[in-house]
Amino acid sequence: MIELLDYPFMQRALLAALLVGIAAPAVGIYLVQRRQAIMGDGIGHVALTGVALGFLLNTNPVWMAVLVASLGAVTMELIRWYGKARGDLALAMLFYGGMAGGVMIINLSPNGSNASLTTYLFGSVTTVADSDVIAIVCLSAFVLAVSLGLRRQLFAVCQDEEFVRVTGLPVRLLNLLLAVTAAVTVTVAMRVVGLLLVSALMVIPVAAAQQATRGFAATLGLSVLFGVAVTLSGTATSYYADVPPGASIVVLAIALFVLVTALAAPLARRRARGGGPVVASGGPSGPAGGTLETAPRDGAGRA
């Protein structure tokens, strides 16, 4: 793998993969906590319209995708608050409308075509330019600042919105901030993983880490480690095997999940025999300063 560093385009690709591997699970853990694992996929559909607008307006598609995806994420939160029974239908129209709008707009652009969208849909190691690296570095810094700097507040909101609202924290503002951060993460990852597969990178490393850890802090750290491992190895694999990096990364992530699950099964059985609640030791404190206690580990909602 060392020889890959001899090529400037692979240096850019590996740096982008490293940042994506850190940022995606750092946000994905909150989406898993609140059972919105599929949210990244929906934002990816909307971000496609932003990419197409970037080509049409002759601007950087990454930054235009950030703007459009953020607006889409805010709209999703508003639908979640006020949509109620018809919310799922509105979300479906938003998702598929974003995909259709992207395809339509790209064909109106003199500088783009459907082929231009392929690298954004599935990722491409050879097309990560210096401007893309700069954008990814800046956006990743924002994602990590929010996901790590506000981890106590975000964790609390994901656990129990009503309780956090009573304590006086701005629940709606935090939800909007998390939605925008997820949108930024999608645009950060689209050059490496692709818009259609980015949701998997936000969720699978977290799901794998949950099989081997109990506390929120430990799960967050291990999921980031898993994310970095699969993005770097998947990017290298795509270079040697001449396959899309997004596919390589997701396949490796799934294989890692299966492996960790198999290795953690005996430990899980011992824990099940022991019983008792799972305490998020070492994790963030609740709004009033106490340690948050979660329900027994049952899948997506555990910390």
Image (tube, rainbow, N blue to C red):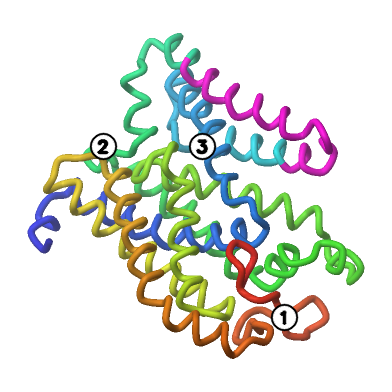
Residue at 86%, 68% (x, y): give it.
Answer: 163
Residue beneath disc 2: 127
* Image spot of residue 189 (x, y percent): 42, 47
The answer for how far apart the CA atoms under marks 1 and 3 are is 33 Å
Choose between 229 and 125: the one closer to the eye: 229
Q: Nearer the viewer, residue 134 or 155?
A: 155
**Mark 1 nearby-residue class (10 Å; few <14, some 14–19, many ≥20):** some
Q: Which mark identifies residue 44?
A: 3
Asked which quadrant contains residue 32, the reply is bottom right
Residues packed near mark 2 inside 10 Å, few (<14), some (14 to 19) or many (20 plus): some
Relative to residue 259, is residue 100 drawn left or right?
right
Toward the right, the furthest residue is: 166
Question: Where is residue 68 drawn, in percent x and y?
Answer: 59, 32
Element type at marker 3? helix
**In the rendered image, the vertical position of residue 145 relative to residue 86, given as above or below:** below
Q: What percent of the width, then of the height, locates residue 29? A: 56, 63
Q: Is residue 100 magenta?
A: yes
* Residue labelled with disc 1: 293
Q: Is residue 25 magenta?
A: no
Q: State which region is magenta.
A: 77-103
Callout 3, which amino acid?
A: Gly
Depth order, front residue of 8/168: 168
Residue found at x 12% / y 55%: 4
Quarter residue 81 falls in: top right
Counting residues from the N terminus, which is met first, the one under dot 2 or under dot 1?
Answer: 2
**Location of residue 166 with respect to 273 vertically, above or below:** above
Dominant SS of magenta comes to helix
Helix, strand or loop for disc 1: strand
Amino acid carrying label 1: it is Glu
Across and down, in percent, residue 222 comes to 44, 74
